[in-house]
Amino acid sequence: MTIEHIEQQIIEEFEQFDDWMERYNYIIELGKNLPLINAEYKTEKYLISGCQSQVWLHAAYEDGKVIYKADSDAIITKGIVALLIRVLSGQTPDAILNTPLAFVDKIGLKEHLSPTRSNGLLSMIKQMKLYAMAFKAKYK
Amino acid sequence: MTSKAPDILAFREDFPILKRSVYNKPLVYFDNAATTQKPQVVIDRIVKYYAEENANIHRGVHYLSQHSTMAFENVREQVRLFLNANHAHEIIFTRGTTESINLIASSFASKHLLAGDEILITQMEHHSNIVPWQLACEAKKATLKYIPFNEPGELELSLLDKLLTPRVKLLALTHLSNALGTINPVKEIIAKAHQKGIPVLIDGAQAVAHIKVDVQELDCDFYCFSGHKIYGPMGIGVLYGKEKWLNDLPPYQGGGEMIKTVSLEKGTTYNDLPFKFEAGTPNVSDVLGLETALNYIQNIGLEHIAAWENKLLTYASTKLQGINGLQVIGRAKHKSSVLSFIVEGIHPYDIGTLLDKMGIAVRTGHHCAQPVMDRYGISGTVRASFSFYNTKEEIDVFCEALKKAIEMLK
Ligand SMILES: Cc1ncc(COP(=O)(O)O)c(C=O)c1O
């Protein structure tokens, strides 16, 4: 599935929710349920420091696609991380580099990706794109 | 001395921002330790300055310049009265507590700090009262030491004698901890340091809005605070220094206003106090805003303010006790209206995010006091800090919202 396709799915899922509470409950459930990263990657080396909540990110290159794994110590951050992984993991470096990740705004989570938030998400996206760029350079 | 208690909540009406809502919920502002809101009179004062009085000061022959100069210098006298300093020229205007501390750290270190010397701080300092000393110590190959604090959040003063070694050149500590709410017995600590001839700087950023400060009674050598934490504007702060120290220390920044004569051949001679430490055009409008803020709170009475805030603290502390897994961080006997806490198994950031959605502004994280968090082995706390304009009803809303957030996150 393309990035736009997955984004559309997520937008439709979020359209079912009437208020912020339901949206956040859903994000929290995503955060709780997904074991996102192996313990061996939850180390300083993979840490993206966001001052308040921490994010760990690991990337691998398989068959022309980038596979991301990530985690966070804050559950809401982790839920949003899960959504980003769902959209970006398994895509080609080019697709990852070109997407504006428009769904974040459409499901009302834009504030979490603002530079004034100290949750590490923005740095995580930057790091995801850097990985994509590195794989693209290495394998093309 | 205590006058009849005013109807403290009537003053809430003076703060226009408290009438607004966020996310369609009435704003509950519990981040007062980060910055306090401004009463209309302070806002009006700044507007009036720019609408009717603006001119550069100290150098003009014209009417507006002289008017502004007089208004500006009058505030110095008001701040002197506020702190009960001996002389108006012991009051230096800065950008805030951070700049006040940097000024002393830099000027003091350049003249008095030598390799092998020590600067003593405490384990509960704001980064603003740590990093300037780290920089000074690094530059001079001196050592930074600290007074630790115990589990409830009180300084281990039994260690003070031992820590005040002959190598200590200065002791810098906070009057009131922004992360724990602890009010330190600064007067006794200052007396102990003075017995050994060690000067003391007090970080009063959190204290001035809650405690009546008398620098002569405390006998501190330096006292620092920020306008924005005492209902005044951002970008203005105060450094009080004893005359003998301010005369002794070299200037911090060079520029206009702080000089007597400048010659490219013969060098520069410096101006007298306080101008020696006020290089460049000062922040006149915010100095005037600060004056209005100081008058405003003195008119209410700091003792009435503190009494109401203590009631709010007790009320909130009692209510929070009923919440499972919640642990208050900072349980000093003498504390101010700062309520820092963690909830078992839940990240403070998550709680802060959900409270925000319910219209409640709290601070989460390390509160610029990472050593305090390290002491407890935690990454951060949720901090609610109250002001006299807050109400018990707001605390009720906060507690219900907190329970809801915990329910969602559990
Ligand atoms: C105890 C303490 N010291 C220093 C500061 C720094 O004040 P400012 O940022 O106004 O310079 C703060 C502000 O949070 C504080 O709480």
Image (cartoon, rainbow, N blue to C red):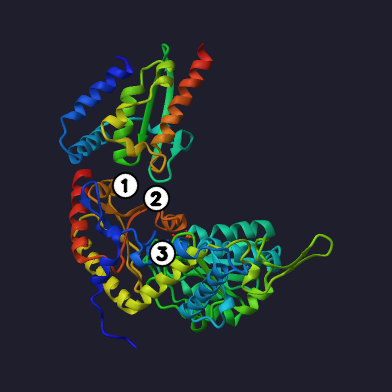
Instruction: Pinpoint the chain carrying mark 3.
Output: B
> Mark 3 near ligand 1 (CB under 8 Å)?
yes
Work out whether residue B345 can be spotted.
no
Tell me: residue B251, above or below residue B404.
below
Q: Which of marks 1 and 2 is nearer the N terminus?
A: 1
The number of numbered discs placed on residues in the rendered structure image is: 3
Residue B229: mark: 3
Tell me: residue B307, above or below residue B410.
below
Q: Earlier in the sequence, mark 1 or mark 3?
A: 3
Q: Are marks 1 and 2 in contact (CB under 8 Å)?
A: yes
Residue B83: give x, y in percent of width and height.
48, 78
Q: Nearer the viewer, residue B71 or A129?
A: B71
Label 1: element kind: loop
Q: How crowded is mark 1: few (under 14 residues within 10 Å), some or many (20 or more)?
A: many
Q: Residue at x 64, y 74 (%)?
A: B273
- In the current view of this chain or complex, which residue is farthest to the right? B265
Residue B347: mark: 1
Instruction: Pinpoint the chain carrying mark 2.
Output: B
Q: Mark 2 points at which residue?
A: B379
